[in-house]
C-alpha cells in the first residue's frame, strides 16, 4: 500500500457518515484502492472491502487493521454527523496521511515500548524490523498490540528495505538497536535516503553527526529521548553558558544505575558532565560509577525491584573544597514510557520538518522541545 491513513473519531458514541461517494472518489484518486466498496458503521467504525479483504477499525477506532496481511490503513474523519443521522452523504470527509514508522530493534524492550507508543499515538507501525545479524530467528512470533512484526536479519536489510519503501514511501525509521550497530545502521539509512530517529546510545557520535550532515538526510539524533530529562540537560547547559567556572574548586561525583543489560555508559550522564566541566569541575568520564548489580541497585540506589530490568537512576553530587557545601542533582526514571513518548514526539517533529522541506536536516531533542508541539 502506498497510502496509509488513521481513523481518528472524536467520540465513539456518534454515528459518523462522511459521505461515501466523496470518500470513494478520494480513495480512487489517490490510488489507495483500484476499486472499493465500503461503508461507515455506527460508533465511528469504518469497514472497507477490497478483493475479499476486510479492513475494520477496533474501538475506539484509532487504527484500521487489514485482517489478511496485518497491514494498517484508515481514514481520518474530520467531521461527524449527529447520532440520529444515517444518510449516505451526511457530512464531508477530511482525510490526512499518517506517519509510517519502522522500529528497528523492536525485538528489544525499548524498541517494543516505542512501537506500542507509536500505535497508541495513531502512527502506522511497519510490520517489519531489522535486527542484529544472525538474531532474527529467535523472534518468529513477535506481536505488538496485535500486529505481527517480522524480524529481519541485518544481512537481508537491503532487499527488505526495497519492499518496505515500495509499500511505505514516506517512511521514518526509528533505531533502538545496539551500540555497536549505531554507525553502520546510520550509514545504511543515509545511503538509502531514509529519515530516521536514532535513540540508540554508543558508537562514534562525532562520525555519526558528520555522516548524517554529509548525506543531507533528515534525522533526529539524541542519546536521551525523555523530554523532561532533556529539559534538565538543557537547563544545565544554559547555566554553564551563562556562568562558566561557577563551581571551580568543587569536586564532582557521578553515579548512574541502569538495567544490567546496558553495557555502555549513559549518554545522558555524559551530556550533563559536559555542562559541569564548563562550570569549572574537572572530571573524566571513566570516573563515572556505573551500578549494574541488582542487589546494590535495590539496597543502595533504591530502585524498585519490579523495575530492575528498566530504570535510569542518576545522581550528580558537587562538594566544595572544604566540604562545607554540597549540591546534589538527581533524576530517577522507572520504566521506559518517558523515552517511548519522547521518541514518538521526535518522529512527529521530523515528519513535520520533512513536509515543510526545512533547510535544516539534523536535529536533537532540544530542537523537538523548542518546537513546543509535544503531546
Image (spheres, rainbow, N blue to C red):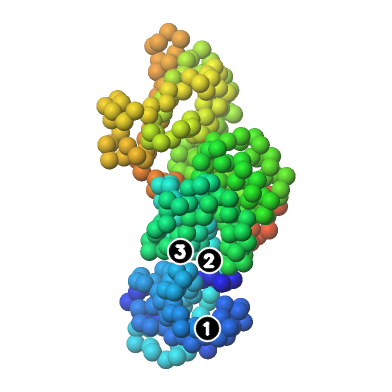
Residue lying furthest right: 214
Residue 69 visible here: yes
Left or right of 194? Residue 175 is: left
**Rendered location of residue 370, percent (x, y):** 56, 47
Image coordinates of residue 304 in percent, x first then y, are 28, 36
Q: Is residue 366 visible?
A: no
Q: Which residue is mark 1?
A: 23
Name the quadrant of the C terminus. Answer: bottom left
Say which label, 2 or 3, has the lower sequence index: 2
First in sequence: mark 1 or mark 2? 1
Disc number for residue 124: none
Q: Is residue 22 above or below residue 264?
A: below
- Identify the residue shown where x is 49% and y is 83%: 50
* SS category of the residue bearing label 2: loop
Q: In 3D space, how far apart are the residues under numbered discs 1 and 2 (Cα atoms)? A: 17 Å
Q: Residue furthest bottom?
A: 87
Q: Tell me what residue is drawn at x 53 percent, y 89 percent.
A: 21
The quadrant where residue 44 appears: bottom left
Residue 352 sits in quarter: bottom right
User: Secondary structure beneath disc 1?
Assistant: helix
Pointer 3 residue: 122
Give the position of the N terminus as an image quadrant: bottom right
| Residue 184 position within the rendered picture, expressed as x and y whole percent measured from the top left | 62, 43
Q: Residue at x 42, y 91 (%)?
A: 87
Q: Quadrant of residue 207?
A: top right
Mark 3 burial class by Cα count in 10 Å: few <14, some 14-19, many 20+: some
Residue under pointer 2: 98
The answer to whether 165 is drawn above or below residue 285 in the figure is below
Q: Are marks 2 and 3 in contact (CB under 8 Å)?
A: yes
Label 3 SS? loop
Amino acid at each position: 500500500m502506498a497510502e496509509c491513513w488513521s481513523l481518528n473519531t472524536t467520540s465513539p458514541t456518534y454515528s459518523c457518515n462522511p459521505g461515501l461517494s466523496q470518500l470513494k472518489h478520494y480513495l480512487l484518486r489517490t490510488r489507495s484502492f483500484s476499486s472499493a466498496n465500503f461503508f461507515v458503521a455506527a460508533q465511528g467504525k469504518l469497514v472497507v472491502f477490497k478483493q475479499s479483504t476486510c479492513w475494520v477499525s477496533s474501538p475506539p477506532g484509532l487504527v484500521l487493521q487489514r485482517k489478511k496481511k496485518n497491514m494498517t490503513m484508515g481514514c481520518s474523519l474530520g467531521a461527524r454527523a449527529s447520532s440520529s443521522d444515517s444518510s449516505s452523504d451526511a457530512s464531508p470527509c477530511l482525510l490526512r496521511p499518517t506517519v509510517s514508522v519502522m522500529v528497528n530493534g523492536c525485538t528489544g524492550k525499548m524498541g517494543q515500548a516505542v512501537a506500542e507508543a507509536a500505535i497508541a499515538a495513531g502512527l502506522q507501525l511497519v510490520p517489519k524490523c531489522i535486527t542484529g545479524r544472525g538474531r532474527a530467528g529467535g523472534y518468529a512470533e513477535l506481536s505488538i498490540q496485535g500486529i505481527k512484526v517480522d524480524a529481519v536479519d541485518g544481512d537481508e536489510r537491503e532487499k527488505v528495505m526495497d519492499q518496505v519503501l515500495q509499500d511505505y514511501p514516506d517512511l521514518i525509521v526509528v533505531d533502538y538497536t545496539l551500540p555497536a550497530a549505531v554507525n553502520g545502521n546510520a550509514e545504511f539509512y543515509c545511503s538509502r535516503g531514509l529519515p530516521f530517529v536514532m535513540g540508540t546510545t554508543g558508537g562514534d557520535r562525532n562520525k555519526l553527526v558528520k555522516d548524517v550532515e554529509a548525506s543531507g538526510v533528515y534525522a533526529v539524533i539524541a542519546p536521551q529521548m525523555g523530554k523532561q530529562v532533556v529539559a534538565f540537560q538543557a537547563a544545565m547547559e544554559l547555566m554553564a553558558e551563562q556562568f562558566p567556572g561557577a563551581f571551580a574548586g568543587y569536586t564532582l561525583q557521578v553515579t548512574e544505575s541502569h538495567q544490567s543489560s546496558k553495557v555502555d555508559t549513559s549518554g545522558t550522564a555524559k551530556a550533563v558532565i559536559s555542562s559541569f566541566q564548563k562550570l569549572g569541575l574537572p572530571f573524566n568520564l571513566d570516573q563515572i560509577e556505573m551500578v549494574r548489580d541488582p542487589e546494590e541497585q535495590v539496597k543502595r540506589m533504591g530502585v524498585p525491584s519490579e523495575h530492575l530490568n528498566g530504570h535510569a537512576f542518576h545522581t550528580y553530587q558537587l562538594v566544595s573544597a572544604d566540604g562545607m557545601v554540597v549540591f546534589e542533582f538527581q533524576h530517577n526514571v522507572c520504566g521506559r514510557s518517558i523515552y517511548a513518548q519522547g521518541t514518538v514526539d521526535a518522529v512527529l517533529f521530523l515528519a513535520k520538518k520533512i513536509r515543510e522541506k526545512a533547510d535544516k536536516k539534523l536535529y536533537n531533542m532540544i530542537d523537538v522541545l523548542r518546537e513546543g508541539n509535544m503531546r
